[in-house]
Image: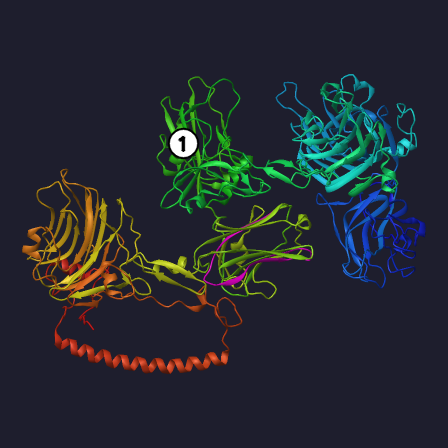
Amino acid sequence: IFLSLEFSTSWVGFACQLVSTPLPYSSFTSSSVYARGYGAGYAKLNRKQGAGGWSPLDTDHYRWLQVDLGSRKQVVAIVTQGRYSSSDWVSKYRLLYSDTQKNWRPYLQDGNIWTFEGNVNSEGVVRHELQHPVQAHYIRFIPLDWSREGRIGLRLELYGCSYWADVVSFDGHSVISYRFRSKKMKIVKDVISLKFRTMAGDGVLLHGEGQQGDYISLELRRARLQLNINLGSNQYGSIQGHTSVTSGSLLDDDHWHSVVIERYRRNVNFTLDHHTQQFRTNGEFDHLDLDYEISFGGLPLSTKQSSGGRVNFVGCMEGITYNGENITNLVRRKKVDTSSFHNLTFSCMESNSFPVFFNSSSFLRLPGQTDSDSLSVSLSFRTWNPNGLLMFTALTDGWVEVAVTEGKVTVYMNVTQKNTRIDISSGSGLNDGQWHTVHVNALENYAMLTIDGDEASTVRTAIPIQIQTGGTYYFGGYFLHPNNRSPQHSFQGCMQMIHIDDHLADLRAVEQGHIGTFENVSLDMCAIIDRCVLNHCEHGGRCSQTWDTFSCNCSGTGYTGATCHTSMYQQSCEEYNHQGKSTGSYWIDPDGSGPIAPFRVSCEMTVENVWTTLKNNLPPQTSVINNSIIRERVSLCPYCLCVQVLSVTNSAEYCEQYVAYTCRMSRLLNTPDGIPFTWWVGRANERHSYWGGSGPGIQKCSCGIEHNCTDPKHYCNCDADLRSWREDSGLLVYKDHLPVSQVVVGDKNRAGSEAKLTIGPLKCHGDRNYWNAASFTSPASYLHFPSVRGESSTDISFYFKTSSIHGVFLANLGTTSFLHIELRGSMVVFSFDVGSERVELSVHSPMPLNDNQWHRVEVEKNIKEVVLQLNRQYRDVRPTPPQGHTKQEFYSELYVGASSGQRGFLGCMRALKINGVIFDLEERAKAIPGVNPGCQGHCSSYGMHCRNGGKCVEQYNGYSCDCSLTAYDGPFCTDDVGGYFETGTVVRYDFLQEAGSFALREVKSLSGAGLPSGANLTREVLVFSFSTSSTPSILVYISSRTQDYLAVVLRHNGTLQIRYSLGGLTEPYTIDVDHRNMANGQPHSINLTRNLREIRLQLDHYPVSTYTLPEASDTQFNLVKSIFLGKVFETGQIDPILIERYNTPGFVGCLSRVQLNGMAPLKAALRSGVAAPISILGILVPSNCGASPLTISPMASASDPWHIEAAGVVFPFNEDRAIGNGVDRNFAIIGGIISMVIFTVLCIMVFVIRHTFRHKGSYHTNEAKGAESADCADAAIIVNDPAFSETIDESKKEWFI
């Protein structure tokens, strides 16, 4: 075997060197040999001697190849190869190691018995670097899978270095006492390391203490390692320094375990077998004060009296170092006190135990006495499973079974002749992973069961007849039992010290094939694993386990998922608001899976902002008690933990906190240059001497800023020092100083001085992390970030919106890890590497993902499962493969957008969070071409161009205005949708039939959608424009299935009248606008709003007028039926005044932008593509009714954030295909020629049609210039007011074509 490697470690006593090349043939042994020439000694890398490698017998039940390294070595790498020039190789194997050829230990990685990937042919070489080096004298290979074309064939090589250490054996009475050079040691820094090996579950490994109460101890308790440390408690007991931390499990396995304790002041690193816990000790002291000595292996005699039943360590230790001193070396040199040792030895005694490891398909068969009238079986076992078969034996007339059932041991005895079954049980919670002994006796006419040698646990029962044993005993499983009895679960765990008929079973003889037999059993090994150590249940989740797996109970933690990794709550009030939540109290978790625990806040959802409020426990107007001359500190920070408060203020856009100081002869700040009497402490424990309404660096109150203080000579009202009550109050708004955590009040000790303090809640709005975004405008653009090193659980979440159908969101192309999230049509795909295998998860959305709406992607990969979630609705879940338990180690940069030549994401991404850390997309995008900070696109910069309620819709290369919810049309929702009504023209819109009642309706309907027929309205908004020169007429009439109606009419003199009939009145309620003639041929706008009894009317740009329905009037518009434009054409009872005075001959003129509660009936009538219950009688000609079109300057390409050239793209790109430059140029020339021809033809047609309609005379306006031809002063104002949006151009003529 060739062993060579330079390797650095903190352990004592090793030197890397070349070891015995080659080892002798005799150093290699095996379970069996296939034939001569296939011996273990030929299993050397690249060797061709013999048959070219090792192969075992096909009938071998437990195949292994073992290497004797000659002495203990530190092995760091393994190389395997198949048998030379053959079809024989090993494709999967496990590695065991030992110092004594007994009690083998499997190689573990990431908490699992590791399976190595082997070879795929006979000549290839596969090398594995061990994640953690192992120290061993013997290495054993266990083939698990091999060539399908041949058999097991193996050649191998090991790499490592020599290892030695001074070993000391402890018998439970021996203690090493290391005395200090001085009697008292005041230590600020400690480094202690050692390795131990034991079969005892309890014992003190080290102990030191001082007379002041300081101490440090390391001890085993129930096979777990506990570090206790106390740097001091004060005499009153208010400061408790005791700190206890537990690590590891099952440490009584007789294997070496390494411990390192590093302390600097209160910061401690506690490392056990490469797993480090970091913690801070309790209390406020930094030094460890020890007296005289520190002991290893147990308690010194001086403290034995008060040890509280603690026992000394039994086992071996090596490599003991204390603050640079090699203690084991000092022991060998007799430089320390070893007087307690009766027999000091520097070697480790071998154990006599021979454990057997069972899996779900294992059994061990052993012989016993036949036809004996007594049965005696005892054994030790350890397991995590609550159920499992320990032993089964057939009797001459029946059978006996011993099993673990729900954590207790049960003996089932069946006597066939008497048809009798006897059950006895004892113990509880025996599936705790600890060793437990079971002793079963059946003698004469009774049976007895004892657990753990405790007589109190012994259970006896009578049996009806004398038994006769069958002579064969099965342990762990029995697969030949009759089908008429329900079989127990097979045992999974370890057994040892098996006694049959009071004789210890020779399991080594079983291994050698001399007695008994076994199947799928690992001999001389106990591979039990505590899957709850390391505890993968995060955030305080409680771990439970069986032999194969563990589970986490997340109840009460605020987190969910297989490992309690994912927060149950949103990151801020802002996120709750965008989920449609209303004002209330909510739990928030700003860092998601990060270390900050969720906490409760109040969320106030307003139109302008979303406010987050954190309250404190200080009541308003708290009196500051005058009881001493010491400044009073009013502590305020039980809002929650300060780190939680800072997580809100750090991400907020604005924060404020109200403070008030009510005083009588109690000064506040004194003068701007003097020493303040009172100050407050904010974040980072900084002291501030400004008050509410003022700012940093200005030692003034609000009245001092506004120059209205009680005494002009002072800058605070309280500084006037008056005997009457005064107050200084205001808002603190410098958020980097908030929140207020303490207030120090000074001027309160004089006679007659009183003060009351009010500290309001902390209020913040905005969440910059939630809206931290970047816009990707080129398929080649990307952002790169430093590498992300994942933990055992890794989570990624972000929001995106796009009009593209595919593109990479983010990717990490590490040398050992691969991670990739991308958009593929209506799917989001997440892929990652597990060893040499690539795993892919995908989630399909039934709705398009390129709809320019926000979508959320969440990925979580933990030790149990991988989850991909879209919009918190659609999920794909896969169990994590065992090889995927390794922590993700990302060595390359993380790319957001395009990577490795793949087409990047186009659109907006925000709130990118990995492992609870927000990635600052905006800041990184500032210097990257093709990526713009923020998700502004066009809508934030140019969205104001979408007028009249139009909705701006982002596109990755532009934007559009959605006018479907308006009465307007056109690219900016500014084009009037109107029509010219000839005499007798009627437009009728019927509300849709729907069952059920209808309450207040918001303005959210589509143009073609309607209120349900029979709706009851308490609020309506009616908006429209018109122009006419004829009277009288009905402009708009809304009918109902009752006698309720609303009508807007023009009377004979051209004035406007509103008629409301809602019931309760004998006559309709009317609003007459008598001072204006509206039939002057000019466009006029009407905005009529009713909310219960209040009616608000606005004509054109004039101020709003308010009217109130009489108390006798109903407030509900019942059973709305239809809306009529131009004329009423309705059956049933109608107000006769309307019919007689205004309905004939009907409206003649132009109506436009008609909208009722968000519905646009006239638009639905004129747009053939909109399905709506519309009927038209007469001639309706489309017209914009004299409105001036809105013109918007085209955007310069250089300032266009979505313009491809401005984004720095160097190649043409189209969503569906790229077009070559030459082809594109030809099409452009041809398109230009065709456009010119079409334009010329259209101009000729327009001229002809205009000429025709001019002479037809259907409608003609020829307005005079300016105000000269206005019919009244109101019209003159409208014509000359530039703010009036409907002013017509000079000499404008309106033609309908």
How busy is the neighbourhood of tag 1: few (under 14 within 10 Å), some, or many (20 plus)? Answer: many
Residue situated in front as seen by the camera: 212 or 1246: 1246
Position above or below: 732 against 34: above
Position above or below: 528 against 36: above
| Residue 1239 as seen in the image, left or right of residue 53 | left
| Residue 871 as seen in the image, left or right of residue 1162 | right
Q: Is residue 833 magenta?
A: no
> Residue 1131 appears in which quarter of the rendering?
bottom left
Picture colour scheme? rainbow
- Please name the predominant secondary structure of the magenta segment in the image: strand
* Residue 895, percent from left and from top: 59, 58
Residue situated in front as seen by the camera: 673 or 757: 757
Residue extending furthest front?
A: 417
Which quadrant, please, contains the C terminus?
Answer: bottom left
The segment highlighted magenta reads 794-819
* Residue 642, percent from left and from top: 54, 35
Q: Is residue 811 magenta?
A: yes
* Residue 408, percent from left and from top: 68, 28
Instruction: Please give the residue where the numbered disc 1 appears in the rendered image.
Output: 716
* Residue 878, percent from left and from top: 59, 50
Residue at left 13%, top 75%? 1256
| Residue 446 as seen in the image, left or right of residue 687 | right
